[in-house]
Image: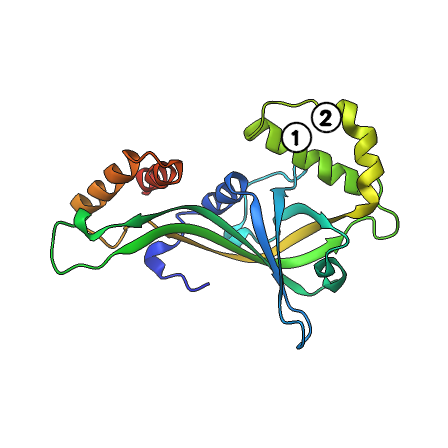
Amino acid sequence: MFVPPLYREPDASWMLELIRRNPLAMMVSNGTEAEGPFATHLPVIPDPRATGEPAAGLAGTTLLGHMNRANPHWAALKAGATVLLSFTGPHAYVSPTLYEVSPAAPTWNFTAVHARGTIEKLDEGVPDEETLRVVTSTVRDFEDRFGTGWDMSESLGYFREIMPAVGAFRFTVSSADAMFKLSQEKTPDIRDRVERSFRESACGRHRATADLMEQLP
């Protein structure tokens, strides 16, 4: 991903926080010449066992995810091959009316993280406890932040029944790029108008974009 210096993340914690808040990733990897690239949308979380602050470019950060083993993408994933995980954060259209100058051109403020790394398939024989750990960790994370605190304990038996169909993986980041395009190229008065417009919007995505604009150094 091409990232002009003006739009780079203030520090690595911004990238990890975007991943946490926007965990539906797109995994992209190479297929054969006939197949072309594979792309799969799937939930991904930071490994809850990981400790410490993220390194620059998220190097060494581990993420956990899973997909349907019937997906041809699962069979195409090869050990050691480079895989891309793309995360999209808050984004919003910017109308030129907010600039109060003419001529002007519209644009789109957006945030994204592209993480490159390698996949380790877990429980490659018969899916077992490692796969279950990824699934339960994902459920726990999402219920705490996005759900209603659902107690999964009565469903663990059902989880074990469906585990043979689940392909879980550990993703180790080798490098990551982030784009936080939030009107940094504009003058302070224009940035304030854009942020205020987003904050007053009925759209939650616009308001989340305004929150990030406010946090910029």
Q: Earlier in the sequence, mark 2 or mark 1?
A: 1
Q: Residue at x 40, y 61 (%)?
A: 3
CB-based contact (under 8 Å), mark 2 and mark 1: yes
In three-dimensional space, the C-alpha distance between marks 2 and 1, rounded to whole angstroms, equals: 8 Å
Disc 1 crowd, CA 10 A, few/some/many (<14, 14-19, 20+):
some
Q: Residue at x 54, y 40 (%)?
A: 20
Q: Which residue is mark 2?
A: 152
**Element type at mark 1:** helix
- In x, y percent, where is residue 117? 62, 58
All told, the count of numbered labels is: 2
- In x, y percent, where is residue 113? 49, 52
Report the disc number at residue 140.
1
> Where 149 sits versus 52, above or below?
above
Report the disc number at residue 163.
none
- In x, y percent, where is residue 55? 54, 49
Q: Is residue 78 visible?
A: no
Q: Nearer the viewer, residue 60 or 8?
A: 8
**Element type at mark 2:** loop
Based on the displayed image, in which of its 4 quarters is residue 120 positioned? bottom right
Q: Nearer the viewer, residue 93 or 135?
A: 93
Identity of the amino acid at label 1? Answer: Arg
Disc 2 crowd, CA 10 A, few/some/many (<14, 14-19, 20+):
some
Residue 4 in the figure: left or right of residue 12: left
Q: How is the image coloured?
A: rainbow
Q: Nearer the viewer, residue 11 or 41?
A: 41
Identity of the amino acid at label 2? Answer: Met
